[in-house]
């Protein structure tokens, strides 16, 4: 009886929060929203740089952002100098802007994410204010800002926080467009909607369409009303602006980089939805196993109220007056906002916890009214004290993560390498391990090498160890290998077989450093690579999205490297040609070394024209070319 009475009181209090429409003056409300935004932004920036960059995601994005800063090429993302097309450029721009303005630090790299987190909380509150009372609006913003998942995600360099911001902006602009009483006002909010959709596409590609698809469904449901059909011009403006913002970057990259169109289609659409080649929880139960705990734990401390709210809404569906209230437009939009994207995420074959981060905005809106009802029933001081304790716990958790040892922390690895005396200018080879954030901590030259024949399908895949051994014989530069304990022994055997002596150093994380000195004595000898290794290298290096070599300053297939160069006419047969020849660029040809390509050392124009247009393994039209190795039989005549 007492439980039933408390439940009825909670229902009446929640209804009172909807009926009560008393609002403060415009100036007072604006001041409150500014203070709330400043408070949430301070919460997001607190201890934002205490934790080092964790691999692999933060390493990818920080490395590509630094490449943009150093090269001045803000259009084409590059990872260690190679094209990196996994995500559109907005996340790299935000990181690079923070580093440019605030200096190279973890807090500067994550500053834009803290701003996006605070702006999303503000938009959630403003949208709740359009639907319900001002009290519920403030509560909704606080619910989002203090939920576990959005708070922690703002401290991680991924595009999901930006996607949550622009998707919430799109919903707010859509609702203001729907409420607009005049055509010019509707067109203005349509322009805001288009900008939000376009920036969302630049943040995470077609994922913005998945999150905002409920807007199209909701507009279709209300299309029978004449006043909504009058908004057709505003919808057209939104679509045109979204295309004008998003399409140019995709068109530029597809035109500049051969094979980019096929890769973007696979990486951002078909490969994520129907293919298991990316290996991200692709089992039939992966959706429930990933997203169930993420939504339940990520909504803490408001999870019990959310579960109760959803259960009561299900029981009230179609039940008289309460059923009519549940069919209000805002209730329908909340339902489709949460249900349709979640259905797509669950059925897709690629699943990661942060994919559902944009759905915490509708969850915060669902929890706002029950929390506001509790404020009406109980003393405000008790709820404020509980919320303060929770905020302190969130900040302590963010600070604690900085002191928890993790093998994913590249800052700790960089300190270990500095203690071992690894020069910052030395080439560092990461063997089957992602340590791209080392460039953020001062390592100038990074490469990735794989021992596997089935590496992750990046646009610029990691080269094989056999190819790296060939490069070692060509340039004779010293290298430092970062390898896990499991792969240390196979790597040492391969180096020994090639005639290299490596000194090892054990690091505190489960990694080993293998350092090799320059080996000038091997310049006049070919690296012994078996036919099986060569065939494996060719099969691995076959680019999945382009079947021909591409310009060396973009990307080219590494299958066409020379194993042993022919003698140079000018002097030492095992040294590169003179700088006067190397400075001439030859389009359609790949440099034999990745380092030479970065330095602008390309094939001399004295090579035969037929060899420029065909891989070195083909015939050079009977003309011997010293860059073909070994020369085809027709070139020996």
Image: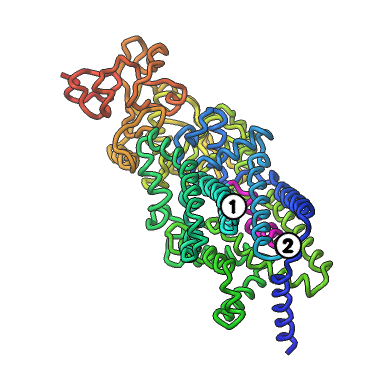
Label count reads 2
Question: Residue beneath label 1, please?
Answer: 169
Q: Is residue 159 among what the camera can see?
A: no
The C terminus: image quadrant: top left
Question: Residue beneath label 2, please?
Answer: 134
Mark 1 vs mark 2: in front: 2
Q: Which mark is residue 533?
A: none
Q: Is residue 269 left or right of residue 129?
A: left
Q: Residue at x 47, y 50 (%)?
A: 236
What is the x, y in percent for residue 364? 64, 63
Q: Is residue 576 among what the camera can see?
A: yes
Q: Is residue 589 left or right of residue 397?
A: left
Q: Earlier in the sequence, mark 1 or mark 2?
A: 2
Classify residue 464 by image quadrant. top left
- Tell me the magenta residue range: 136-157
| Magenta part, dominant SS | helix
177 or 211, nearer to the observer: 177
The N terminus: image quadrant: bottom right
Is 162 placed above or below 288 here? above
């Amino acid at each position: 009886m007492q439980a039933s009475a408390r439940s009825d009181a909670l229902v009446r209090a929640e209804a009172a929060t909807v009926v009560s429409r008393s609002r403060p003056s415009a100036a007072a409300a604006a001041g409150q929203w500014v203070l709330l935004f400043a408070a949430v932004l301070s919460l997001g920036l607190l201890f934002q740089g205490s934790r080092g960059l964790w691999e692999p995601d933060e390493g990818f994005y920080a490395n590509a952002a630094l490449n943009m800063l150093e090269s001045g090429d803000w259009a084409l993302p590059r990872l260690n100098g190679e094209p990196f097309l996994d995500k559109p450029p907005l996340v790299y721009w935000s990181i690079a802007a923070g580093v440019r303005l605030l200096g190279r630090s973890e807090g500067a790299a994550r500053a834009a994410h803290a701003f996006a987190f605070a702006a999303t909380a503000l938009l959630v509150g403003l949208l709740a204010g359009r639907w319900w009372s001002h009290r519920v609006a403030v509560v909704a913003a606080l619910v989002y800002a203090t939920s576990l998942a959005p708070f922690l995600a703002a401290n991680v360099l991924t595009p999901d926080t930006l996607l949550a911001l622009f998707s919430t902006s799109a919903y707010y602009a859509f609702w203001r467009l729907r409420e607009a009483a005049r055509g010019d006002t509707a067109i203005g909010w349509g322009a805001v909607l288009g900008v939000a959709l376009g920036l969302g596409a630049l943040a995470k590609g077609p994922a913005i369409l998945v999150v905002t698809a409920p807007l199209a469904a909701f507009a279709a449901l209300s299309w029978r009303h004449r006043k909504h059909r009058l908004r057709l011009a505003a919808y057209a403006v939104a679509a045109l602006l979204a295309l004008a913002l998003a399409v140019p970057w995709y068109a530029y990259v597809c035109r500049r980089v051969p094979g980019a169109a096929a890769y973007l289609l696979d990486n951002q659409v078909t490969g994520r939805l129907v293919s298991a080649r990316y290996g991200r929880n692709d089992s039939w139960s992966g959706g429930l196993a990933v997203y169930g705990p993420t939504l339940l734990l990520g909504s803490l401390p408001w999870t019990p109220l959310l579960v109760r709210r959803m259960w009561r809404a299900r029981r009230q569906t179609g039940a008289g007056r309460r059923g009519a209230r549940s069919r209000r437009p805002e209730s329908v939009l909340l339902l489709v906002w949460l249900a349709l994207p979640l259905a797509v995420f669950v059925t897709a074959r690629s699943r990661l916890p942060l994919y559902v981060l944009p759905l915490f905005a509708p969850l915060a809106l669902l929890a706002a009214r029950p929390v506001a009802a509790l404020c009406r029933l109980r003393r405000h001081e008790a709820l404020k004290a509980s919320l303060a304790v929770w905020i302190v716990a969130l900040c302590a958790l963010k600070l604690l993560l900085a002191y928890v040892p993790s093998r994913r922390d590249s800052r700790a690895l960089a300190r270990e390498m500095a203690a071992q005396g690894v020069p910052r200018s030395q080439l560092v080879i990461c063997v089957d391990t992602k340590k791209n954030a080392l460039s953020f901590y001062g390592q100038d030259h990074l490469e990735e090498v794989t021992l596997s024949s089935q590496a992750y399908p990046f646009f610029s895949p990691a080269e094989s160890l056999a190819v790296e051994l060939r490069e070692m014989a060509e340039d004779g530069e010293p290298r430092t290998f970062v390898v896990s304990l499991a792969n240390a022994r196979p790597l040492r055997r391969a180096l020994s077989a090639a005639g290299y002596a490596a000194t090892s150093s054990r690091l505190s994380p489960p990694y080993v450093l293998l350092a090799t000195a320059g080996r000038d004595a091997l310049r006049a000898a070919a690296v012994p690579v078996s036919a099986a290794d060569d065939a494996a290298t060719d099969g691995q290096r076959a680019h999945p999205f382009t079947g021909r070599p591409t310009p060396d300053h973009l990307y080219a297939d590494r299958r066409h490297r020379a194993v042993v160069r022919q003698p140079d006419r000018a002097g030492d047969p095992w040294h590169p040609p003179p700088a006067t020849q190397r400075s001439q660029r030859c389009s359609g040809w790949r440099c034999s070394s990745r380092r030479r390509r970065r330095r602008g050392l390309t094939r001399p124009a004295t090579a035969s024209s037929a060899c420029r247009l065909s891989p070195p393994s083909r015939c050079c039209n009977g003309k011997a070319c010293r860059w073909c190795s070994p020369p085809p039989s027709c070139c020996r005549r």
